[in-house]
Amino acid sequence: MVNAKNLLLLALLFSACSKEEITPVVNTSPPTQSEVKYVLKVEAGAGGKVDIAEGTYPKGTEVTIRATPNNFFNFSGWSNGKSENPLKLVMDKDISLKAEFVKQDLNLTFSYTEFSEPVLPPSPEGLAYIKINDVPHLIIPFADLKTTKVDYLRIFQFDEKAKKIVDKTKSIFKTISEVGYPKSPLIVKDFNKDGFLDLFLVDHGQENSMINGRWEGGYLLMYYGSANGFIKQNFPGITDKKLFYHHADVGDYDNDGDLDIISQRWSSASERVPADNTVAILKNNQGKFEIITLEKPLDSVGSVLFTNLDDDPFLEVMCATYRNDQGSLWAWDPMANTTNVINNKMGPYEIHDLVEISNAKGKRILIFPEDYQGKKTPILTTSDNGKTISSSTDMFDFQGRDVIVNDFNGDGLADIFTYYGNDGEWTSSSYGPLTKSIYLNTGNNTFANPQEVKDIFGKDFTSFIGKLFYPLESTPEGYKFLRFEEFWPSPFPKAAEIVILKMK
């Protein structure tokens, strides 16, 4: 039998054992090296990125960090004074670093050391940007409408490492062509489908003296690309006819898979054409061209456009007159061999160019009269294939140079670039704000100037007035332009700057 005294002893014994079991054991020895951890923080400055933003690492861990500059930036170093990239760190403390980047110097100088210096200024009409074996090149005609001097269609290679634009005309063009004065966009296409881009340019000829009441005229220039440069082509009846050319367009009018060319042509001092002013199709047959001339034009021809004017699958030729009295739009259907007047009340305009813009919202044709005297000649527009023509309310002031169609803000819609000037054109002060040269498609084939234009380095070009800008290509960062310095009235360009623009 357990008495009260024994119960008391048992309770005291149980209490002592319980306290002893839950007493914590305190480790007073120092932690091992692997248990000590440090924090690494890495920040990227403007113009690049880093592969590690933040991490925690045991003491003694070796960590490698890498900085990657964005396009058009260079890595300049780390905030701790180190310049190695990638950089190796040993984590023996908390570390905070910043990768620094600087913008590339995109200023380039023209080098004429491989060829003679030009004797005439460059022409804003007929410029073209082209890549040869992935190397950027710029084609520039050097010409003057009113002089007796001649220069050449030249090609320049971009050498951004050497910060130069080098004249490569002698090495790339196997036969060098003189140019009187270009009057059409330089068309860059693969006409013979051999994988190399080809070149087609209209040489209008100079207007310095008349012979028997006619200008002397110029030639059509065709070069086929190859692995070793551009080879000049001769197609009898086409490239050997010295006429007074004004405009051309390209398209596959007969759906045979080959790109054809429309050529506007006036009689010259040495050659005659039907009605002294007509249009011809340069029909492409697997890289060989033959000419089909319209023998009975309905009216004069200033500019031409391949477009579909009816319900069949073939393209027709739209022709716009070039005169100061009441002009017209008329059409030639080469497949049916018929002609018809579209609109005989176009107005007293010398038409320089025709441009078609099409998307899901339909088709719109823009008609660009020349405006050399600053008379504020309107840009004309039609959305019903010319049946009704009106003055554009969303586009204005065209200087009579190439109209460039491309997507300048990366929204998938065709935008337009022209050269905006002030009244009294063709003077050194005729250039206006850059934004007035850019027309962004609003999505329904109407256009608006961008509200803001900045380059990737933050420089604001919204109200910038400068010399000639020329569009090059779209990049992930923005659209790349070349801004010429000393372009006009200097005899030839000496410097240029690549500008990557973002538009809103």
Image (cartoon, helix red, strand yellow):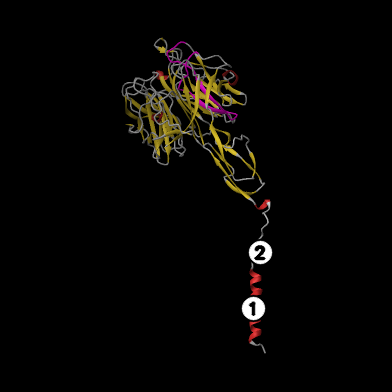
In this orientation, which residue lies closer to the viewer: 432 or 259? Answer: 432
Kindly report the distance in space between the C-alpha atoms of the residues bearing marks 1 and 2.
23 Å
Q: Which residue is mark 2?
A: 25
Which disc, if any, is residue 12?
1
In this orientation, which residue lies closer to the viewer: 150 or 450? Answer: 450
Asked if the stretch drawn in magenta spans residue 246, the answer is no
Asked if the stretch drawn in magenta spans residue 143, the answer is yes
Instruction: Tell me the quarter of the image containing the N terminus.
Output: bottom right
Q: Residue furthest front?
A: 5
In this orientation, which residue lies closer to the viewer: 367 or 81? Answer: 81
Which disc, if any, is residue 39?
none
Magenta portion: prevailing SS class: loop
| Quarter assignment of residue 341 | top left
* Residue 197 screen position, x and y as percent: 56, 28
Callout 1: SS:
helix
- On the picture, is 231 further left or further right than 423? right
Q: Callout 1: 10 Å neighbours few (<14), some, many (20+)?
A: few
Callout 2: SS:
loop
Range covered by the magenta-colored residues: 119-148
Instruction: Tell me the quarter of the image containing the C terminus.
Output: top left
Residue 235 shows in the view: no
In this orientation, which residue lies closer to the viewer: 171 or 335? Answer: 171
Closer to us: mark 1 or mark 2?
1
Q: Mark 1: which amino acid?
A: Leu
Q: Mark 2: which amino acid?
A: Val
* Residue 178 screen position, x and y as percent: 52, 15
